[in-house]
Amino acid sequence: MRNDQQAMTEDQWHQARLIWDYHQMRHELRPVDVAIGLGSHDLGVATRAAELYRAGLFPTLVFTGGNSPTTKARFPRGEAVHFREHAIGLGVPAEAILLEPNAGNTGQNITLSREVLAAAGMNPTTVLLVSKPYMQRRSFATARKLWPDVEILCASQPLELDDYVKSIGDEKLVLDMLVGDLQRVIEYPTRGFAIEQEVPEDVRAAYASLTQDGFTGRLIS
């Protein structure tokens, strides 16, 4: 297990960038029926959602998320509640935002957001998922499994790994998350949680290398 205070090596940065690049879907953004901002520790999700709303990409925005061990201290009233307040502060009208404050994982983010939209009389055919940069691929795979009749696009803040780590302020946390999300991309299809996606060999090798180096804080058993 690596010491949390030990500086990352150049090889570890290289492996992390391979996984970072793989996680991002690079969808070309265009107008959609609705956007869903996926709750997390990263308030940049709400910032990006507000930017895309102001750009006219969607008329309705759902924020979804309760709390997790990594967000309870930062967002004591729940991820979705704090994200909504942040977006309103950035100019998104309160009436354009729907709130889903209970989801505890990505599957619930999708399922419960769908229920909130249905309760509001909305049945979208195109949905934009706004997430952390390294959560794009997993959220896409989850949504395609649980909501197969909807076209899914993904977006996040357009940051490189180095800049994202600086914005979060905790490189160990970010790399643990990168590795943990990749494990879920690989494992969740076998559990029925997501569609299967091809994982290139160099990305699998990067995963094995960083796991061996101790970036295991977000792995599932």
Image: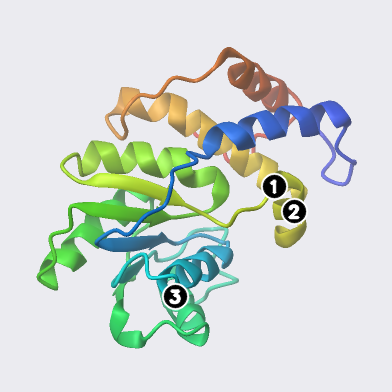
Is 108 located above or below residue 57 in the figure? above
- State the image coordinates of residue 142 (x, y, percent, origin top left): 33, 40
Residue 221 visible to the viewer = no
- Horizontal arrangement in the rendering, residue 198 relative to residue 168 (left or right): left
Say whether disc 1 or disc 3 marks the residue closer to the N-terminus: 3
**Secondary element at tag 2:** helix
Residue identifier under label 1? 160
Number of numbered discs on residues: 3
Q: CA distance from mark 1 to mark 2?
A: 5 Å
Determine the image quadrant of residue 161. Answer: top right
Q: Residues within 10 Å of mark 1 (few under 14, many from 20)?
A: few
Residue 60 drawn at (x, y percent): 29, 71
- Residue kind at label 1, given as amino acid type: Glu
Residue on which disc 3 sits: 54
Query: At 85% across and 37% down in the image, what residue appears?
Result: 8
Q: Are marks 3 and 2 in contact (CB under 8 Å)?
A: no
Q: Is residue 105 above or below residue 98?
A: above
User: The residue tagged with tag 3: helix, strand or loop?
Assistant: helix
Q: Which residue is mark 2?
A: 163
Query: Could you tell me how far apart the alpha carbons at marks 3 and 2 are, in whole angstroms?
Result: 24 Å
Q: Quadrant of residue 94?
A: bottom left
Mark 1 and mark 2 in contact? Answer it, CB < 8 Å.
yes
> Real-space Cα distance between discs 1 and 3?
23 Å
User: Residue flagged by tag 2: what amino acid is it?
Assistant: Asp
In percent of width and height, residue 28 lies at 43, 46
Q: Quadrant of residue 187?
A: top left
Task: Name the residue located 27 percent from the left edge and 38 percent from the top edge.
Answer: 144
Disc nearer the start of the sequence (3/2)? 3
| Circle 3: residue type | Arg
